Image (cartoon, rainbow, N blue to C red):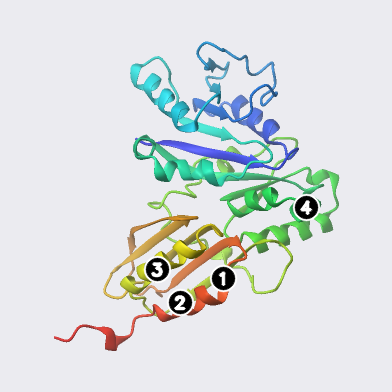
C-alpha cells in the first residue's frame, strides 16, 4: 500500500507549526513522519519535538514520528522507507512542512519524477494555510504567497477571529478567484478537523473521478493577482488524439506558467471518463469510472497558473472537439 504524503505550506506566520502540533497531538491512531525543510528554527514546539541528531528520527508520545530534513528530499524519503522495511521504524503517512517562503512545486514534482519514490509514496494533497489578517497584503506583495494558494488542494484560513466577517468574505472571494478547485476551511488557534487535512486525495488520479460540483465558480472577471484560473467546459465529446497533441504542445511552451491543471474528459468512443492532471511540465492521464447510462456527459478542465494563455487554451481545446468527418472511412 502506498504511503500518503501531505505537503503543508503557507506564508510566514500563517500558523503551520500550530496546525502541525495539533495534528501530532490528536489521538487519530496514525503514525506520522514529519519532514521539515527548515533546520535550526523551532518548526515544532521544543516540548513536542526533541531532535535526535544521530538518527534524525524521534518517536512522539502519541506515536508520531518526526525528522528534520538535512539533505535532499528524495534521500530522506528513501531513508524512511529503508527503515520502515527493516522494521526499525513504523509510520503510515508523511507530512512535509515547507518554509514560509517556499514554492511547493518542486516538492510536489518529486513524487512525479522519481520512480522509486512514486512506487512507495502517494502525494495526497497540498494543504495551504492563509493568514486572514495579513493575507490581502501578502498576496499582493509576495508571489510566493500566490504560488502557495495556486497549488493548494485545500486552503485553511487562520486568524479569522482577528478580522471582521466582511474581510473574511472578501478574502474567500479572492482565494476562490485564484484557485476555484480548492475547498476552503477554517482553523481556530491551530485547531482544525483532521478529516479536512488528511486523505484528501487531491493528487490521486484514481480518486478524482468527478470534479466537485461547487468548484466551478465564475472566474471570468479581471483581477490583479498574477496567479489566476479559468475553467473550460464542453458537453461535446473530445478527440483524445487531438487533446494529447494540443496539451503536449501547450505544456512545452507554457508549462512553467501552468501551476496546476486538472480535468475529467468525455472522449469519443470511450465509455469511461478520462481523468488527467498536471504540474508545470509534468502531465498524466488515466481511465476513470464508467459513464452511467442516463448520465449527462461532458468535459470539465480547470487551469491554474501565472498569466495563463486563456484564449489560446480555449481555442485549442475547442478545436479538440470530435468531428464526425474526422472518423476513418470504413
Quarter of the image with the N terminus is top left
Quarter of the image with the C terminus is bottom left
Question: Residue furthest toward the front?
Answer: 253
Q: Position of residue 328 (x, y in %)?
A: 20, 83
Q: Which mark is residue 316?
A: 2
Contact? badges 3 and 1 (CB < 8 Å): no
Mark 3 neighbour density, 10 Å: few (under 14) some (14–19) many (20 or more): many
Chain-order first, disc 3 or disc 1? 3
Chain-order first, disc 2 or disc 4? 4
Measure the alpha-carbon separation of dots 2 and 4. Answer: 33 Å
Chain-order first, disc 4 or disc 1? 4
Secondary structure at badge 4 equals helix
Q: Nearer the viewer, residue 151 or 156?
A: 151
Secondary structure at badge 3 equals strand
From the image, tell me which residue sits under label 3. Answer: 265
Measure the alpha-carbon separation of dots 3 and 4. Answer: 37 Å
Mark 2 neighbour density, 10 Å: few (under 14) some (14–19) many (20 or more): some
Question: In the rendered view, would you say 48 is above or below 3?
Answer: above
Mark 4 neighbour density, 10 Å: few (under 14) some (14–19) many (20 or more): few
Q: Nearer the viewer, residue 213 or 95?
A: 95
Measure the alpha-carbon separation of dots 2 and 1. Answer: 11 Å
Measure the alpha-carbon separation of dots 3 and 1. Answer: 21 Å
Q: Which mark is residue 232?
A: none
Chain-order first, disc 3 or disc 4? 4
Secondary structure at badge 1 equals loop
Question: Residue furthest toward the left?
Answer: 330
Q: Nearer the viewer, residue 267 or 11?
A: 11
From the image, tell me which residue sits under label 4. Answer: 141
From the image, tell me which residue sits under label 1. Answer: 309
Identified at 77% across, 50% down, the residue is 138
Chain-order first, disc 2 or disc 3? 3
Q: Position of residue 173 (x, y in %)?
A: 72, 62
Amino acid at each position: 500500500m502506498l504511503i500518503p504524503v501531505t505537503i503543508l505550506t503557507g506564508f510566514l506566520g500563517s500558523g503551520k507549526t500550530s496546525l502541525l502540533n495539533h495534528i501530532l497531538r490528536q489521538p487519530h491512531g496514525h503514525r506520522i513522519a514529519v519532514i521539515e525543510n527548515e533546520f535550526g528554527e523551532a518548526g515544532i514546539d521544543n516540548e513536542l519535538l526533541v531532535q535526535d541528531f544521530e538518527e534524525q528520527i524521534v518517536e512522539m508520545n502519541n506515536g508520531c514520528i518526526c525528522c528534520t530534513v538535512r539533505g535532499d528530499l528524495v534521500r530522506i524519503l528513501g531513508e524512511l522507507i529503508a527503515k520502515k522495511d527493516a522494521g526499525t521504524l513504523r509510520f503510515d503517512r508523511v507530512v512535509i512542512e515547507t518554509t514560509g517562503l517556499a514554492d511547493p512545486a518542486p516538492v510536489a514534482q518529486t513524487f512525479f519524477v522519481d520512480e522509486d519514490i512514486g512506487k512507495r509514496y502517494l502525494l495526497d494533497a497540498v494543504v495551504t494555510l492563509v493568514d486572514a489578517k495579513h493575507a490581502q497584503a501578502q498576496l499582493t506583495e509576495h508571489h510566493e504567497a500566490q504560488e502557495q494558494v495556486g497549488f493548494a488542494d485545500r486552503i485553511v484560513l487562520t486568524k479569522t477571529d482577528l478580522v471582521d466577517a466582511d474581510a473574511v468574505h472578501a478574502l474567500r472571494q479572492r482565494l476562490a478567484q485564484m484557485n476555484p478547485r480548492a475547498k476552503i476551511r477554517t482553523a481556530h488557534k491551530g485547531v482544525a478537523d483532521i478529516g479536512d487535512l488528511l486523505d484528501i486525495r487531491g493528487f490521486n488520479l484514481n480518486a478524482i473521478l468527478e470534479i466537485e460540483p461547487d468548484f466551478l465558480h465564475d472566474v471570468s472577471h479581471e483581477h490583479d493577482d498574477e496567479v489566476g484560473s479559468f475553467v473550460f467546459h464542453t458537453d461535446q465529446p473530445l478527440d483524445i488524439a487531438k487533446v494529447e497533441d494540443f496539451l503536449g504542445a501547450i505544456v512545452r511552451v507554457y508549462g512553467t506558467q501552468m501551476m496546476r491543471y486538472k480535468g475529467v474528459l468525455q472522449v469519443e468512443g470511450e465509455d469511461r471518463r478520462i481523468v488527467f492532471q498536471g504540474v508545470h511540465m509534468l502531465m498524466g492521464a488515466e481511465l476513470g469510472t464508467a459513464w452511467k447510462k442516463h448520465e449527462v456527459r461532458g468535459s470539465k478542465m480547470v487551469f491554474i497558473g501565472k498569466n495563463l494563455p486563456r484564449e489560446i487554451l480555449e481555442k485549442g481545446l475547442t478545436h479538440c472537439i470530435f468531428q464526425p468527418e474526422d472518423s476513418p472511412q470504413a
